[in-house]
Amino acid sequence: MASRILLPLLLVAAASPAALAGFDVGQMLADKPQYATFLKLMTQTKVAEETNRLKSASLLVLPDKAVKPIASLPADKQRLAISNHVLLKYFDPIQLGEMKDRTAMLPTLLSVADKRLGVVNYTKAADGQMYFGAPGAACVSKLVKVVAARPYAVSIMEVSEAILPPSLGGTGGPGIGGRRPKGGKGKVKPASADGEAKPPPAPTTAVPK
């Protein structure tokens, strides 16, 4: 599934040396008002600056309707929570979907302060849907769509729920290896060559839910 999502984007970017240049996640999100609160928190906590200094990164962003669990935290914990949504390596749905194992532990920016908590559990369900979860918390944050990307440097992907360990307000439950996460079926929406997400073509036949 994932190989059909971002392949056109990767081919276009591979032909452009600029794709490997530095990035600014604030600038990439500036014209996307649905992530305004998440961007504000990234800026206030200085996590945006730290992310921009990385050689490569993957940002798991939350739309305004899902960011309350982080926004309601004290300022010091907001920084930790936001840091846990920055993976320390470039990933996109192709790479995630083609991992040899269906589960993995991915280091986050939080590992700089706490190596034990600074990881995100990743799992690919039987229907192909991808989920994330913090250590000790349920792995139920669904990968919704690609928001923007500069392949091999930075990707920004929307997830459905905050990825928080129990110490930051996350809900305890089965992680990798537990029962199938909630969230239902669905496909990750692709990003166009200019980095903007766009919906996939309408199916020609009905798909059972």
Image (cartoon, rainbow, N blue to C red):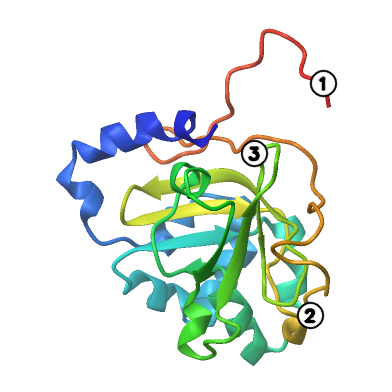
The residue drawn where x is 48% and y is 55% is 29
Q: Nearer the viewer, mark 2 or mark 1?
A: 1
Give amino acid for label 3: Gly
Q: Nearer the viewer, mark 2 or mark 3?
A: 3
For marks 2 and 1 on the same chain, the one whose residue lies earlier in the sequence? 2
For marks 1 and 3 on the same chain, the one whose residue lies earlier in the sequence? 3
- Expressed as whole percent of the image width and height from the top left, the position of residue 130 reads 63, 48
In the image: residue 117, left or right of residue 164: left
Residue 10 drawn above or below residue 99 = above
User: Badge 3 is on which residue?
Assistant: 128
The residue drawn where x is 52% and y is 81% is 110
Residue sitting nearer the eye, 38 or 101:
101
Label 1: state its secondary structure: loop
Q: Would residue 84 be seen by someone viewing this image from the given angle? A: no
The residue drawn where x is 36% and y is 34% is 9
For marks 2 and 3 on the same chain, the one whose residue lies earlier in the sequence? 3
The residue sitting at the left extreme is 17
Residue sitting nearer the eye, 166 or 179:
179
